[in-house]
Image (cartoon, rainbow, N blue to C red):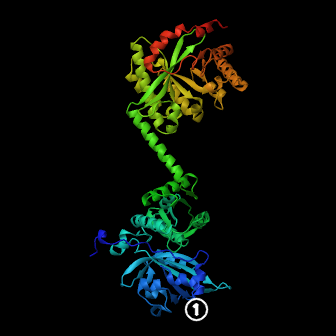
Amino acid sequence: MSPPLNDIKEQSLPQPNPRPASISADAVAISIFDSHTSLTPAESAFRYANEAIIITNADNAVVDVNPAFSELTGLALSEVEGKNPEAFSILPLDDSRTTRLMREELQLRDRSKGQIRYRSHDGQYYPGMMSINRVRDERGQVNHHVIVLADLSAIPSHARHLNREVYFDALTGLPNLQLLTQLIQESIQHAEQRQLSLAVCALDIDHFQRINDRLGPHIGDALLAAFAQRISHLLFGDDVLARIGGDEFVLLLHHGVEEAFFEKLLASLRQPLLIEGQTIYLTASLGITRYPDDHVQGDVLLRHANQAMYRAKQRGRDTYHFFDSQQDRRLQVRHEQRQRFMDAIHHDELRLFYQPQVDMRSGRVVGVEALIRWQHPELGLLSPGDFLPIIDGTPLEVDLGEWVLERALRQLTLWQSEGMALPVNVNISPSHLLVNTFSQRLAELLARYPNVSPSLLKLEVLESAAMHDVKAALKNMARCQALGVGFAIDDFGTGFSSLTHLRQLPVNLIKIDQSFVRDMLIDQDDMAIVESVIYMANRFQRPMLAEGVETLDHARALMSLGCELAQGYGIARPMPPEAMAEWLSHWPTRQDWRGLATLQ
C-alpha cells in the first residue's frame, strides 16, 4: 500500500547536465574513447552527469554507461555491454500500432526523443524520457549513438507510489496537467536555487477541431500522437512536453532558449505528417513566458503562457508571442478600474451635470446637454476624461449609456413638475447606438416616464459612430425618430466623410466641434473649417450649434458666419441639476450676451 502523500519527503528535480555549453553531445561520446589519464571536461560531464548516459556503437550495442545509469538501473557496464538497450528493459510505453510507426520514424532520424519505460534497480518499471543522438563520421556513416535517459517518475518524488494514469496522458504517454503543475513548481525552485532561467510555452494546434471533424477521431488521435513525437525530437535532456487536454500542449524548457528555437519548432511543425496514408499539414500557435522575468507562481506562469498563445492566434496563427509582464500588469489595472467603475454605477456614485445651450440672437435657452461626472468617495468629483477612456470599447459603455438615459428622463420629469421644460441632449457611444436592441430599450425607458415628451430628448451621436456602420446607424436612428426622439451629430467636422453623412443621416442638429471653435479666432485653418461646416449645414438646411464658445468675440464671429446656437464656458459651465433654476433666473440679466441680438 502506498504511503500517504504528506508522509513522503519531496525530492528535488534531477539536476541538468553540467556539460559546458560549448561541448556537444558528440564531443562527450568521442571523448569516452580518449586514452588520456586525466579527465577532460567532456569526460567529467559523462562521469558526473545526473542523467543516465549510454554510449552504443553503430549497431546500437552498448559500449559504455556512466555511473548515473548504474545508480538508476542497478546494472553495471559488464551486465549490459554489447547488448541493445531493449535487451535490458528500456522499452516504449506501449506497443500500439501508432507507437510502432513512431519507432520506425525514429530510426530515420539522427536526433530523436521519446517517452519510454525502464526497469529500475528495484525491479519495477517507471516512466522515463530517452533522447538519442546518432553520431556520424566524416564520410557520413553512423559511428556511434549517445543516449540520455531521464527518470520522469522522480519528478515529483511521490510519482513512484501512484498509478501512472494519475500523471500521464493515456493517448500520448506525455505528462498531463496534474504532473505538469508540479513539475513547473519544482522547476521554479530549482531555477531559483541555481539562478537559472525557465520557459513555459503553451502550444495549440491551429484549427484542429476542423481537422478532427473532417478526418474523424481515430485519425485525430494518431495525429496528436505523431505531433507530440515531432516536438519531442527538438527537445533537450531535461525539457518536458506535456499534453494538458485536446490539442493543447505545454513545453517546459530548462535551457536558455532563443527565438531561433521557436522558429525552428514552428518550421518543423509545418512539415507534413503521414497518417494512415493521408498527408496532413498542421501549424501551431505558441505562447511563451520566462521565469524569473515573469516572477510568479507556477499556475500563473501557465496562465500567462496561455495568454501569450491566444495573442499569437490573434496575430494570425502559425507564430509565437512572448508574454509581456508589464503589459499584463497594465491589463490587470485596467480590469480593476473597470470593475471599480461598474461598482460606481451600482452604488450611485455617478452624477449628471447640465450645460445650457442658447440662441445667441434671441437670448433664449434652447436646451441643455447632460454631461457625466463621477463623485468618487476618495478622489472627489472626476470629469469624463478621467474615467471614460477606461471603458472605451467595452460593454460598460452600454451600461453607462442606459444609466444616463434613465437619469436624464428622471430629471426631465422632475423639471416638468417644477414648471421647467428644457430639452436634454444625451451623448450615446458608437457601440451603444449600434446595438440591435437600442431602439427597443429606449422605447421601454420612455414608457417608464410617460409624462416626458420624447421630443424633449435628443441623442448626440459622434460622427465616427455613423461612419463605423452607416447602415446599422441609419436603421436605429430611424426607429428612434419614429418614437419622437431627435438626433444631433456631435463633433461634426472631425470625420472623413462629413458631406456624405450630412446628406445621409437623419439628424436634427449639427454640433461644430469645440476643438475648431476654441481657436478659430487665432488659427486660420480652424476658422476655415468652421466656415465650411456652417456653409454645409446651411446648404442642407440643418440647424447648427457651436461648442466651446468662451468669449463674446467667439459669439460675434459665429453669428456673422450664420451660426446662432451655442454652448460653452462663456455662457455657463456644466452644473448640477439643482443649480439650473437659479442660473435660468440670472441668465436674462447678462446684458453683454443679450446685446448680441442687435447684431445683423
Q: Is residue 452 visible?
A: no
Q: Secondary structure at mark 1?
A: loop
Of residues 244 and 151, which is closer to you in this image?
Answer: 151
All told, the count of numbered labels is 1
Assess disc 1: are there few (<14), some (14-19) or many (≥20) residues with their C-alpha within 10 Å of its C-alpha: few
Q: Residue at 36% of width from left, 69% of height from top?
A: 166
Residue 43 point in image, percent of width and height: 56, 85
Q: Is residue 202 above or below residue 567?
A: below
Which amino acid lies under the numbered mark 1 shown in the image of this protein? Answer: Thr
Image position, residue 120 (x, y; %): 39, 83
Q: Can you identify the residue that label 1 sits on?
A: 37
Q: Is residue 321 left or right of residue 190?
A: right
Query: Residue 161: x percent and y percent?
Result: 33, 74
Q: Is residue 134 above or below residue 542?
A: below
Could you say which quadrant of the image residue 185 lies in? bottom left
Residue 245 lies, with reference to residue 506, above or below; the image says below
Residue found at the far left of this picture: 1
Pick the residue in front: 556 or 246: 556
235 sits to left or right of 447: right
Is residue 313 visible in this depiction of the protein?
A: yes
Q: Quadrant of residue 264?
A: bottom right
